Image: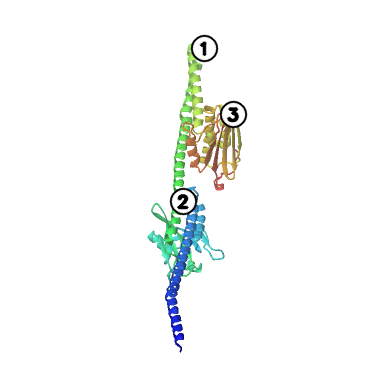
Amino acid sequence: MPARWSVYLSFHLDGITAALTVFLPVALLTNVLAGQARLRALEAEERRREAAALATQQAALRRVATLVARGAEPSAVYPVTVTELARGLDVEHVTLVRFDADDLCTVLATHDRPGRERLLVGERMPIDGDSITGRIRSSGSPARVDDYSVLTGTIASRMRRLGMRSAVGSPVSVDGTVKGALMVGSGQDGPLPEGTEDRVCDFADLVSTAVSNAETKAELRASRARVVAAADQARRRFERDLHDGAQQRIVALGLGLRTIEASVPAEDVTVRNQLDNVINGLADLYANLQELSRGIHPAILSKGGLGPALRALGRRSVVPASVRVDLDRRFPEPVEVAAYYVVAEAMTNAAKHAQAQGITIQVGLVDDALRIEVADDGVGGATADGGGSGLIGLRDRVEAVSGRLEVSSPKGEGTTLTATIPVPPEELAPAAAS
């Protein structure tokens, strides 16, 4: 080979070697950087998905929390809870159950994806064998099942028929007592993600709060009802004692004095006048006691019902009153007594405070609820929380029978007091004119 070709080849080999020496590390570095970039992109996408999932869960939790904060009844909270939990965790199945005393549980709410076999609200199942439901009831703590195929019992068998392979649940506890369980189930292979227990617990706590609120309100209503019933019984006894005791005694004394008066000689004018004054005084005392008796517990309410009692109340009103009672039946005594005192207190306020010239009273049955409306044309400005008006005690009385009292009283435009008292159909007495 000529020398010049040797030099030429040597020169090019040196160039190739130099190029490889420079570009190979660059290529390797580029590849490493590209891999790192892809990894960072994947990590960023994973964080984005996790953030989106967390936002979805938090939004679902807020919707349930808002419902509970508004004081919704548990029966309204249950279906929303299971639906929002299923949406927030993106799971196929959610069930809320109540633990019963006979080793059974009752389904309160359930959510399943369309087209799947599902549990039914109200369905009862025995807590036998081994199940997440039984584990929660016995431990009072969150529990998980990673493989339903290894469990035994009615509930586990039912969950397998629903296609569930794993589940996580949390207890629903009120005042330290486990009342039920909230559970999510997955039909996918493998266990539910770690941390699912915490998400379920958040929703279970809201259900617990709703149940606790409802129990507290029920206890308050029952307490009010007991106080009101005791007061009404005391009034009835007092009214009966007045009628059978003091009033009858006054009548007897009056008749006795009339007998004595008849035996006094006609010319003894002074004695006859004195006796006549005493007898008239007894008559006035009898009338006063009779009026007091009506205010304590009107006998006409017990005997004739709400219609006659309210019309009699209207006739005795200091302020001219128009009374319209559209009722054709009797109601439970606590309801009639509450309605009577709503009208009586409103009329008293109109006479004492409102400077009213007229009162309109309307009473009727609307959608299985007794509706009482008393309106005056006075100065307005009354509030249900105002001291001295008697409306606070009246609100307690109405709420004791699960009713609602509303007061509308713009200044200068009069006052309208409206009470609505629910009366379940099964509690309505046989129809009777009132």
The residue under the point 43% across, 61% down is 196
Q: What is the crowding at mark 3: few (fewer than 14 residues within 10 Å), some, or many (at least 20)?
A: some
Residue 148 percent coordinates (x, y): 45, 69
> Residue pushed farthest top?
267
Kindly check if marks 3 and 2 are in contact, taking CB atoms under 8 A apart as contact: no
Q: Amino acid at mark 3?
A: Gly
Residue 218 percent coordinates (x, y): 46, 47
- Sequence-first disc among 3 and 1: 1
307 versus 155 height, above or below:
above
Q: Amino acid at mark 1?
A: Ala
Q: Which residue has dot 3 on it?
A: 358
Q: Amino acid at mark 2?
A: Ala
Q: Which residue has dot 1 on it?
A: 266
- The CA distance from mark 3 to mark 2 is 45 Å
Nearer mark to the viewer, of 3 and 2: 2
Nearer mark to the viewer, of 3 and 1: 3
Residue 210: mark in rendering: 2
Among the 4 quarters of the image, the one containing residue 323: top right
Q: Nearer the viewer, residue 82 or 181?
A: 82
